[in-house]
Image (cartoon, rainbow, N blue to C red):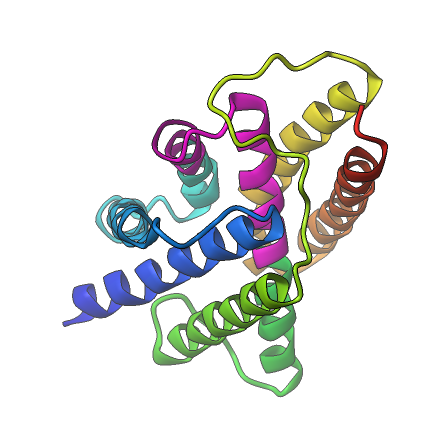
Amino acid sequence: MDALLFLFISSLEWLALIVLTFAMFKFGIRGYWGQLVFTSFLLSLLSYLIFVVFEWNMLGPLLQLPVVFLFFWQMYRVPVFYAGLMVVNGYLWYALLQTTIFYAFYISGLTLLPDTPLSFVVQSLSAGFAFLAAWQLIVKNIGFTFVPDTERIRVEWNGLHRRLLIMTVLGYAAVSSFKLLYVSGNIALMILALSTVIFGFLQYFVLQKEYVRT
């Protein structure tokens, strides 16, 4: 039963993250629900192997994001450069949402431990708010439009694209270290501060890409 609950919550979170990412970049979701649910379930199996079977708790995002990238690139046919950007940006936004909920519980005096009923509540709330945010983006027609709707495209390696690539790699490094946020003290604060700076710069360059279109 615990395994089924883990897979259900994990699938729900992955589905919410991918739907939010699609909505942020104005990718059509209609017609993709079968692939989205299938992708989310496979990613939940990967999470179960990492966190429960092998107990590689600190390596979760480090191992998960490359697989998500492969899904975006191969299943949803997003060009390589933009697949990496979409995955990292979407994950950072979802992590920001979940961190906000996490600290709201923390301030309330509640202790969150992995794989506990309270942690499942936080995960469910995160997924729910992500679905709500995605719905609002779709209804209000808000999002980025610079990701091409084609499998292959030549990316010109100008200054902006190089900066986007650097921030995508740094964003991946920041996401990979998120599990260390459970560590108290200066390490967690340093990771949170650096992740916030990286997140801010990435959003700045994404907005620049949207409006400058170079």
Residue span colored magenta: 67-94
State the image coordinates of residue 165 (x, y, percent, origin top left): 68, 24
**19 sits left or right of 86 in the view:** left
**147 sits left or right of 14 in the view:** right
State the image coordinates of residue 118 (x, y, percent, origin top left): 42, 80
Please state which of residues 119 and 69 is positioned toward the viewer in this rendering: 69
Quick one: quadrant of the N terminus?
bottom left
State the image coordinates of residue 109 (x, y, percent, origin top left): 60, 86
Quick one: quadrant of the C terminus?
top right
Q: Residue at x 75, y 39 (%)?
A: 206
Q: Which residue is drawn at 36% across and 27% down?
A: 74
**211 sits left or right of 175 in the view:** right
Residue 32 located within the stretch drawn in magenta: no
As drawn, the residue found furthest toward the bottom would be 108
**137 sits left or right of 207 in the view:** left
Residue 93 located within the stretch drawn in magenta: yes
